[in-house]
C-alpha cells in the first residue's frame, strides 16, 4: 500500500509528522478513514481517537478533542485543540473530571451553562471510553 | 567626604545588588530557552491554520461571517495590550505601551472611540495613568508557570463575546515579537476583521483548490475556525511576548551586572585612596609632633 504524508498538530506542539498508510479520524459526521489519494475534504472533528497506521505494523492511537481535518493533495493534516497519546491519559484523573462534570451538569441553572456542561461531560466520557477500563 | 565606613557599606551593598542581578540574568536565560522552545513548538499549528484559513477564505464570496469581513463599521476600536506581569526587563513593557499610546492618540484624533483590554499588569499600570476611562478590563496571568492554550482561549472567547455584543468594531492586538535576545519588536496586529495574508509562499496545493468537499459545510467550518483562529493569534502573541520578556530581562540584567562591576571598581579605588590619605595624615601628625619637641 502506498504511503502519504500525515501531520497531527495541537496549539502547543507538533505531535506527529510522517508518512503513513492509513489514518482513522473521528469526523463530526462520523468516523472516516483516509488512504492515499483521498479526495480533498475539510471537516470538523469531535472528541475521539485518531488511529494512525504506519504500515510496518506500527499503530499509534491518540485522543483528540475538537479540531479540523484537512485532506488535500499534499497530505492529511489534523489541527486538534487538544491531543494526547492514549498512554498518557490518567484514568483516575479522567474519572474525577467526569464526576465533576456530572455535578456541574446537575448544578447548571441556565440552558446555556447546562449545554456547555453536557458537552464537556460527553467529551470526557468519550475520552474515558477510548482508554477502556 | 564620606568616611571609610560609609564607603565600605556602599561597596558591600553594590556587591549584594550585583549578585541579585547576576542571578536574575541567569534565571532569565534559562527561562528564555524554555519560552523560545514553546514559541517554536506552537509555530506549525499557527502556520497550518493560516494556510487552511487562506484556502477557505479564498472560496468565500463577499460577505461571509462578521469575524472575517467585519461588521462594516469602524467607530469603536478595541486594543488588546499584552505585556509582562513583572518589571525589571528593560524597555520591554514601555515600548509596547508607547506603540499603544501612539495608536490611541491617532485613533482619538480621528474621532474614534477607543477601548483597551489589558493582558498583563505592567501595561495596565502604565496605561492607567493616562487612559483610566478607556480601559475596560485587566486580565492577569500572574502565577502561571507556563502559558497554556486554555489561557489564550479564554481571552479569545472574551474578545469574541464582546464583539458579538457589539461592544467594538475593530480589534487590534499589541505585543512584542521576538527577534533575538537584544531585539524585540513591538507589533500591532489586527484581529477582527481577520487579516488573512494572501501567502504566496504557502505550500502550493496542486490542482484546483475549489474541489474541496466540506463536511458539514463551508460556512459551518469557517464559523468554527475563525474564533479558534483568534485564540491562536492570542496564544502566539502571548508566547512571543514571554520569549521577548525573558530576552529583554536577560540583556537588562546583564547591563545592570556590568554597571555594578564598574561601580564597585570605582568605589574600591576611592576607598583605598582615602585610606592611604588617612595613614599619610596620621604619619605627618606624628612626625611633626616629634619634631616640635
Image (cartoon, grey):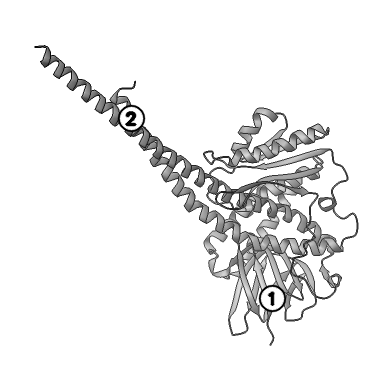
Residue A21 visible in the shown view: yes
| Residue B51 placement, left or right of A102 | right
For label 1, the SS is strand
Residue B24's x, y, as percent?
A: 45, 44
Residue B278's x, y, as percent?
A: 24, 23
Please, which residue is most extreme toward the left here?
B293
Quadrant of the image occupied by residue B284: top left
Q: Residue at x 60, y 68 (%)?
A: A15
Residue A12 visible in the shown view: no
In front: mark 1 or mark 2? 2
* Residue B270, disc: 2
Label 1 resides on the chain identified as A
Quadrant of the drawing holding the C terminus of chain B: top left
Q: Residue at x 21, y 24 (%)?
A: B280
* Label 2 packing within 10 angstroms: few (<14), some (14-19), many (20+): some
Please, which residue is most extreme toward the top here?
B293
* Label 1 packing within 10 angstroms: few (<14), some (14-19), many (20+): some
Label 2 resides on the chain identified as B
Front-most of B4 and B169?
B4
Residue B75's x, y, as percent?
A: 84, 38
Rounded to the nearest whole Å, what is the CA distance between mark 1 and mark 2?
76 Å
Front-most of B14 and B85?
B14
| Residue A23 placement, left or right of B7 | right
For label 2, the SS is helix
Q: Residue at x 74, y 75 (%)?
A: A74
Above or below residue B51? Residue B6 is above
What residue does disc 1 label?
A24
Residue A54's x, y, as percent?
A: 62, 80
Quadrant of the drawing holding the N terminus of chain B: top left
Amino acid at each position: 500500500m502506498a504511503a502519504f504524508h500525515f501531520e497531527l498538530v495541537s496549539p502547543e506542539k507538533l505531535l506527529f509528522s510522517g508518512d503513513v498508510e492509513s489514518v482513522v479520524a473521528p469526523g463530526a459526521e462520523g468516523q472516516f478513514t483516509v488512504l492515499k489519494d483521498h479526495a480533498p475534504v475539510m471537516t470538523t472533528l469531535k472528541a475521539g481517537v485518531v488511529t494512525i497506521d504506519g504500515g510496518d505494523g506500527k499503530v499509534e492511537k491518540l485522543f483528540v478533542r475538537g479540531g479540523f481535518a484537512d485532506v488535500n493533495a499534499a497530505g492529511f493534516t489534523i489541527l486538534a485543540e487538544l491531543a494526547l497519546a492514549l498512554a498518557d491519559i490518567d484514568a483516575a484523573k479522567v474519572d474525577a473530571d467526569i464526576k465533576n462534570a456530572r455535578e456541574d451538569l446537575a448544578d447548571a441553572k441556565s440552558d446555556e451553562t447546562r449545554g456547555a456542561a453536557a458537552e464537556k461531560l460527553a467529551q470526557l466520557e468519550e475520552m474515558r471510553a477510548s482508554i477502556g477500563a | 567626604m564620606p568616611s571609610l565606613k560609609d564607603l565600605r557599606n556602599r561597596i558591600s551593598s553594590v556587591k549584594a545588588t550585583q549578585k541579585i542581578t547576576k542571578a536574575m540574568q541567569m534565571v532569565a536565560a534559562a527561562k528564555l530557552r524554555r519560552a523560545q522552545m514553546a514559541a517554536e513548538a506552537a509555530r506549525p499549528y499557527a502556520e497550518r491554520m493560516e494556510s487552511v484559513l487562506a484556502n477557505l477564505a479564498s472560496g468565500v464570496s463577499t460577505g461571509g461571517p462578521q469575524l472575517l469581513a467585519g461588521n462594516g463599521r469602524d467607530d469603536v476600536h478595541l486594543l488588546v495590550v499584552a505585556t509582562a506581569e513583572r518589571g525589571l526587563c528593560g524597555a520591554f513593557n514601555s515600548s509596547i505601551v508607547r506603540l499603544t499610546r501612539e495608536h490611541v492618540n491617532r485613533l482619538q484624533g480621528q474621532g474614534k472611540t477607543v477601548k483597551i483590554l489589558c493582558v498583563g499588569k505592567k501595561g495596565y499600570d502604565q496605561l492607567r495613568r493616562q487612559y483610566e476611562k478607556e480601559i475596560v478590563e485587566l486580565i492577569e496571568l500572574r502565577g502561571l508557570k507556563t502559558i497554556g492554550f486554555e489561557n489564550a482561549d479564554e481571552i479569545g472567547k472574551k474578545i469574541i463575546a464582546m464583539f458579538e455584543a457589539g461592544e467594538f468594531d475593530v480589534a487590534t492586538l499589541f505585543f512584542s515579537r521576538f527577534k533575538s535576545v537584544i531585539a524585540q519588536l513591538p507589533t500591532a496586529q489586527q484581529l477582527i476583521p481577520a487579516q488573512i495574508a494572501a501567502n504566496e509562499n504557502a505550500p502550493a496545493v496542486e490542482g484546483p483548490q475549489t474541489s474541496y468537499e466540506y463536511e458539514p459545510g463551508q460556512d459551518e467550518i469557517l464559523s468554527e475556525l475563525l474564533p479558534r483562529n483568534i485564540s491562536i493569534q492570542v496564544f502566539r502573541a502571548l508566547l512571543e511576548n514571554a520569549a521577548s520578556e525573558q530576552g529583554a530581562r536577560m540583556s537588562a540584567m546583564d547591563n545592570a551586572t556590568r554597571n555594578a562591576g564598574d561601580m564597585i571598581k570605582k568605589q574600591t579605588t576611592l576607598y583605598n585612596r582615602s585610606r592611604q590619605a588617612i595613614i599619610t595624615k596620621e604619619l605627618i601628625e606624628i612626625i611633626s609632633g616629634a619634631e616640635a619637641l
